[in-house]
Image (cartoon, rainbow, N blue to C red):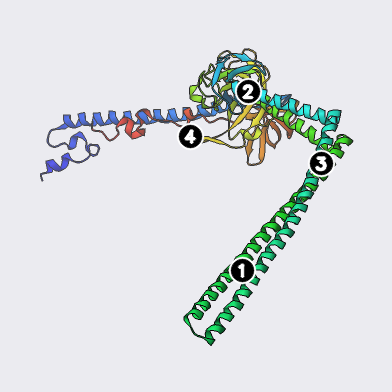
Amino acid sequence: MSNQDTTSVLPSSTYSDETDLDGDQPRRSRKLGRNTVINGIIVVAVLVVLGLIVAVLRGDDDRATTTAQTSTVSTGDVTATVSANGNIAAASTVNVNFQGNGGVVTSILVKPGERVRKGEVLARVDSASAEQGLASARVQLESAKASYAATVAGQTSAEQQRDQTSVDQARVSVNSAEASLRSARQSQTLTRQQQNAAVDRAETTLENARADLQTARNAYQADKTAENKAAVQAAEAVVSSARTTLALAKESRESALLQARQQVTSAEYQLKSARASLRSTQASVAVNSQGATASTRAQAQAQVDSAQIAVDEAQVTLDQTKLRAPVAGKVAQVNGTVGQSSSSSGSSGGSSTDSGSSTTDTSGFVVLTAANALQVTADVAEADIADVQVGQSATITMSASGKEIEGTVTLVDAVETVTNNVVEYGVTVTLNDVKGIKLGQSTQVVITTGSKQNVLRVSSSALTTIGERTTATVQQADGTTNTVEVTKGLEGDGFTEILGGLSDGDTVVLPEQSDSGSGGFTFPGGGGLGGGFGGGGRP
């Protein structure tokens, strides 16, 4: 490397024009001038940036001093509310159905949208069978009443004569049975005598035949001739015949005696039955002659009562052929048609004039809504539900018209509803006035959860609560401040009741609110000192 090359790479500030041996003095002078200008620009830029930073910081301090706000402790009202949205709905929905067996629908007398009175007929089913049943029950009731009247009135002369005739006939039956028994017993005695005599004769004949047989045998033993042998055989035949006759006579006697005994037994039973019938007839006649007893009247009255119950049941069955409105209200749906069975109606066949109604169960033949009782069911957030209670007052604002109506909380759901991971509770508010209000209208509900009048209060934003400790910064007359602990009462929407720690007229400094727009300084271009000016760039 030559001396010329070595000199050219040294810093220009270490050589003067006199040391430039190669005659390049003009070029080095121009180069020195450009570097001096660039360095000056950098220094000026740094000073400007530093000035801007200082100005910003001073501006923040000035702004903090000038924008500090205060609130004065005063006496006034504190009100806490909870807001939610909901729609107007009927407080009650009634599904009206035919009772009993129902039947084929013959007429429907109302249409959706009509108002009906309590007890008004809404529809009818075929009543022919029910009318026949009622007529038959009434006939049975009249018969029971007539029987009771006859029982209470006692016997007539004709009835007394009839009873006496019955007793006489019973006695004749007894006498006839006694005669039959005597005849049967006599017949039994005669039969026994006759049959015994027949048996005796058969036995005598058998004994004589045996004696003749023995004589024939003795003659044959003395002279065994063919004639004597034939005589023995003839005698044996006579004995055999006599035995048969005796056996038949005994069998005939047993059969005849058995039949005679049966006739006697039957006659005894008939006599016993006739005597019992006589005693029963005599007892009945005696009772009839004494008039109706308490038990007889009670029995007759029971028959009347039973017939009356049958009439009442038949009347109920007939009444059930008419479908009546159990309450006054407005017809929301009619789920049925003429000609079909009353039990085949369903929600799919109905129609509704209030499409915004909250009615969910529309299974009745006719669905009624209570026209004079309206309510709003609003969903209250989990954080607010603890403050809502039954009986609290509320203001309902119609979203479309802005009309305000007072109401009362009548129900707070105990079970939550979760929608998109948000926990809410249903709160039902009943309207105090329903004039001009339609089902389904959207509303905003403001529930007053707490209210106090003429209490010491301060703006809620003037208080700082950390855990269970609440503080406020009080500003003195000379501008100095001090922090005091505060006891809170009712926390309202804009004010908080003060129970201790502050006095009426105190000036409280409101805590500063963070301003995301002045959180720091950003250099132009976002690159800081080096990035904005390109300090490492080439000339």
Which residue corresponds to mark 3?
281
Identify which amino acid the numbered label 3 is placed on: Thr
> Is label 2 in a helix, a strand or a loop?
helix
> Is residue 236 shown above or below 196?
below
Which residue shows up at 53% across the image and 78% down it?
232
Disc 1 or disc 4, which is closer to the eye? 1
Question: Mark 1 or 3, which is nearer the eye?
Answer: 1
- Dots 1 and 4: beta carbons under 8 Å? no
> Given the image, on which type of amino acid does mark 2 rest?
Gln
First in sequence: mark 3 or mark 4? 3
**Residue 509 in view of the camera:** no
Q: Nearer the viewer, mark 3 or mark 4?
A: 3
* Label 4 CA crowd tier, 10 Å (few <14, some 14–19, many 20+): few
**Image coordinates for residue 231, horizontal then vertical, percent:** 52, 77
Q: Which residue is mark 1?
A: 246
Above or below for 27 versus 467 = above
Q: CA distance from mark 1 to mark 4?
A: 118 Å
Q: Residue at x 79, y 33 (%)?
A: 300
Marks 3 and 4, how far apart in space?
91 Å
Displayed quadrant of residue 451: top right
**Disc 3 vs disc 4: Cβ atoms closer than 8 Å?**
no
Q: Residues within 10 Å of mark 3 (few under 14, many from 20)?
A: many
The residue where tag 4 is placed is: 420
Amino acid type of disc 4? Asn
The answer to whether one can see residue 2 in this image is: yes
Q: Nearer the viewer, mark 2 or mark 4?
A: 2
Earlier in the chain: of badge 1 and badge 4, it is 1
| Residue at far right of view | 290
Tags 1 and 3 in contact by the CB under 8 Å rule? no
